[in-house]
Every structure is written in C-alpha cells, then in structure tokens.
Image (cartoon, grey):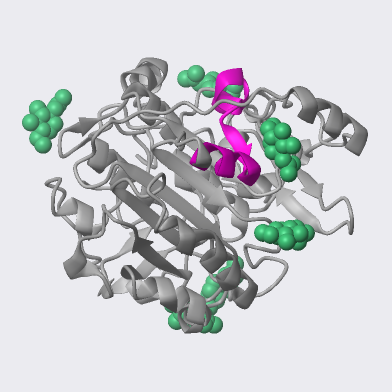
Amino acid sequence: MRFSRTLVAGSLASAAIAAPASPTATSAKDVYAAQATALTRSPTSHVKGKVFDRYVSIWFENTDFDMAAADPNFQYFAKKGITLSNNFALTHPSEPNYMAAVGGDYLGLDGDPFVSVPGNVSSVVDLLEDKGISWGMYQEDMPYSGFEGSGWVNQKNGANDYVRKHNPEIMYTSVVNNKDRAAQVKNLTMFYEDLKKDKLPQWMFVTPNMTSDGHDSSVTVAGVWLKTFLAPLLKDKNFMKNTLVMITFDENETYSTQNRVFSVLVGDAVPKELVGTTDSNYYNHYSEISTVEANWDLFTLGRWDVGANVFANVAKHTDDRLRKWTGSDFNTRYFNYSYPGIFNSKKGKWAPQPVPDVHSNRSGRTTLPAIKKTWEKEQPKNYYHGQLEIPDGYNPPVYPYKY
Ligand SMILES: *[C@@H]1O[C@H](CO)[C@@H](O)[C@H](O)[C@H]1NC(C)=O
Ligand SMILES: *[C@@H]1O[C@H](CO)[C@@H](O)[C@H](O)[C@H]1NC(C)=O
Ligand SMILES: *[C@@H]1O[C@H](CO)[C@@H](O)[C@H](O)[C@H]1NC(C)=O
Ligand SMILES: *[C@@H]1O[C@H](CO)[C@@H](O)[C@H](O)[C@H]1NC(C)=O
Ligand SMILES: *[C@@H]1O[C@H](CO)[C@@H](O)[C@H](O)[C@H]1NC(C)=O
Ligand SMILES: *[C@@H]1O[C@H](CO)[C@@H](O)[C@H](O)[C@H]1NC(C)=O
C-alpha cells in the first residue's frame, strides 16, 4: 500500500483518494528502463506579462528566517533584489506547503504521505495553459520526466535525493493523468538542456535535491548550492528575459514560533530602484499564485489564491490593492497546524472536499471557466470556505476570505 486508508475517514474518503497509476516500490532496474523511454517535453511561449515575462520559483527547506538572513550566500541575493520580510508558510510539515503553492489549498494535509489530489482539482498550470503560457517543473535528481515514485536515492551512497513530497505538480491527478503534462515535470539535467537550447518555459518551479535544499544538510549547503546555480543564470541571456525569480523556503524550522520564511525576489524584472530593498507587506505561499495571475491576467482557481496579496512590485502595475493585516490576532497566528480536510490524518478532522468559489472576482480576474463548469452545481453546498460547519482547530491559512 502506498498510503493508508486510515489517513482519512468518512464517506468521500475512498473516492477522493484513488490509487495512483504507477507503484512507488520500483526497483532501480525498472527506473532505468523507464528512464530510457520517458517522454520529455519542453514547450515554449512568449506571452508578455505586465511586469515580468518569466517566473521562476526556487524552494529550499526548513530554515528559520534569521538563519537564512544571516547566511552570506542568501545575503548575496538579498542585495541584488527585494527581501520579503513578512512572507509566511501555511503550515507544517513540507508537503502541504508545496501542494498549496500551486493549487491554492492543501485540503487538510498534515503530514508528508503519498497523496494524490483528486482529478477535478485544478492547479496553476491549468491557468497558465489557458493563456498559452509554457510551464515546467525542474526537480534535481528526479530520475526521469513524469516519474511518479515517492523518491529516488543516490545510487552510489543511498542518500536521499529526489522526493515526491517536494514536487507539487506530480501530486495532482490532473497533471499525472495527462502524459504531455507529466512530461513537463523534469529534472535539472533537462533544465540545463532547455537552457542551452533556449527552450526554458515562462513559468517554472525548481526543487534542489534533499542535500542541496538544506533538508538533509544546512542553510550553508543550501546557500552554496543557490549561489552556484543562480549566480551564473543571472548573467545568462537565455534565462534573463524579463525574469522574476522567487527564492524561498517551504517552512520555518521551529514549530513553536511564527512560520515566517526568508524570501527574496531577484532578476531583471526587479527595477533598479528596488534592488537591495525590503518589502514588509504580509504574504504567504498563495501570493506566488496570485502574483502570477495578476501579471498575466489569468483566471483564478477560486481558492486561497483569490484573496492572497500580490507582491507589491507587481501589484503596483496591476490594480491590485495590498491588504494589511489589521487584526490584533496577527502575533498569535503561528501557521503551525493544519485544518480539517480530505487528507487530514487525525481522527475527527475529516471534512468534505471543498468546493472552489466559482464566482470569484479579484480585480476583474474570475474563476477559470473549466473550474466553474465542474463545480457550479456543488455551490453553495460545502461552499468553499463558506465554512458551513467548521470543526475545532480550524486555522485559516490567510486572513478572512474577503477580496
Ligand atoms: C471530485 O472528485 C472527487 C474524488 O473523485 C469526488 O468525490 C467528487 O464528487 C468530485 N466532485 C465534483 C464536483 O466533480
Ligand atoms: C533526467 O531526465 C531525463 C529525461 O527523462 C533522463 O533522460 C535523464 O537520465 C535524467 N537525468 C538524471 C541525472 O537522472
Ligand atoms: C545533490 O545535488 C548535488 C549537486 O547539486 C550533488 O553533488 C549530490 O550528489 C546530489 N545528491 C546527494 C544525495 O547529495
Ligand atoms: C504552534 O505554536 C504555538 C505557540 O508557540 C504552540 O503553543 C503550539 O503548540 C504549536 N503547535 C504545533 C502543532 O506545533
Ligand atoms: C521563525 O520565524 C519567526 C518570525 O515569525 C522568527 O521570529 C523566528 O526567529 C523564526 N524562528 C527562529 C527560532 O528563529
Ligand atoms: C469583476 O469585477 C470587475 C471590477 O473589478 C467588474 O468590472 C467586472 O464586471 C466583474 N466581472 C464579473 C464577471 O462580475
């Protein structure tokens, strides 16, 4: 069994989590056989954005804000861009943060198990494809494009290398069940090939391996990796094409303090006057989706993306009002636990699959028509974050859902 049915309880549970197509317990031999024939795709596009024409998100692991801010290599990039001093993770541990950063929710997930997001839940790639914007995932040491296993270790020393829990799009059934999409979930070998051939996509997500991202190592190792990877790219004309790079961490290491993560925006889409500055507006991982939506005037997912603040350097050009956290509860929100949902492991924390807001309208950006079509009939039943019956322990990942 790849995952335990006891992870969820309730009538929708078995329907919501269908067994994924390929087994995780594959032998190295099987992996190499599949590697030889795996489909890989590198579509490109040139859709002008309001502020940037390419968005690159690079995620590191489990580091407290102050630790990252003190590292000389992270400081090197801070000096070249905008430091986000109030960017928050959503919960602990890793996987829900990654899942949510592309899909606008983590559906109650409170661990790192093998889960598959139901096929009727969309993610940012649906919004991008709708506007003809190319995308790609680049996961260091993923053995081949579209690999669905839970992980892959270094074949020489057995150390953790690639892990599925840090690869958000592979968790979405709407991605893995489409072979063209799965073929765009690639490794860093492919990144360098795409770079060389000038075939990098307009939206990409980069996950270093378990050593490079700081998970099994330290912020020092992560910083050195980042400098080695990104510094040359900032001078590469195949990479720098009005590009905005988001450097961030999935979560803060200390569960009992607020889950603030160190994040920096760099690239040639950062105007000179903002280089070396700090933006102290409130953001969280959903701001990555809302910023991309604002930049390319995409539809929304109708989930937590709708209400999330757009990064100020982009919002200035997209008519997006930046909301302040006005509640006195700011300092008591730790973002260190999950809420009920189909993936929640705790007894009594099961809740139905939430229905997206099919009538969202954020500065004129409305819910993707395909999402509307799928979910319209379900509304207002289980209305998304309409919170008909909110069980104990509900901790909204963003401030109250108004936009
Ligand atoms: C979405 O998919 C889940 C899991 O397959 C299913 O239980 C649910 O009824 C579906 N909802 C809609 C509106 O398609
Ligand atoms: C990366 O993926 C490609 C395409 O599937 C594959 O051919 C290659 O062997 C992989 N590289 C590594 C280092 O696993
Ligand atoms: C992780 O990536 C680095 C280079 O980026 C490489 O040296 C290392 O062998 C990889 N795997 C492990 C388990 O460290
Ligand atoms: C979250 O942080 C608060 C404040 O430090 C702490 O009381 C609580 O136990 C933490 N919750 C979890 C699940 O770690
Ligand atoms: C985690 O983030 C908080 C900010 O909310 C920060 O004050 C704290 O330093 C971080 N944790 C630790 C132990 O540094
Ligand atoms: C969405 O809101 C904008 C104002 O921000 C308005 O002009 C537009 O008509 C609304 N669209 C829909 C479909 O309601």
Picture coordinates of residue 234 (x, y %)? 40, 58
Report the side of 310 relative to 250 (left or right). Answer: left
Identify the image quadrant of residue 135: top left
Picture coordinates of residue 331 (x, y %)? 37, 76
Q: What residue is shown at x 52% (from left), y 33% (from top)?
A: 353
Q: Is residue 191 magenta?
A: yes
Q: Is residue 389 magenta?
A: no
Q: Is residue 205 above or below residue 232?
A: above
Quarter of the rendered structure image containing ligand 6: top left
Q: Is residue 106 above or below residue 276?
A: above
- Residue 393 seen: no
Picture coordinates of residue 204 (x, y %)? 46, 42
Query: 14 and 114: which one is in front?
Result: 114
Q: What residue is shown at x 81% (from left), y 36% (from top)?
A: 24
Query: 194 and 140: which one is in front?
Result: 194
Q: What residue is shown at x 60% (from left), y 75% (from top)?
A: 219
- Residue 212 seen: yes
Stretch in magenta: 173-195
Picture coordinates of residue 232 (x, y %)? 47, 60
Query: 162 and 384: which one is in front?
Result: 162
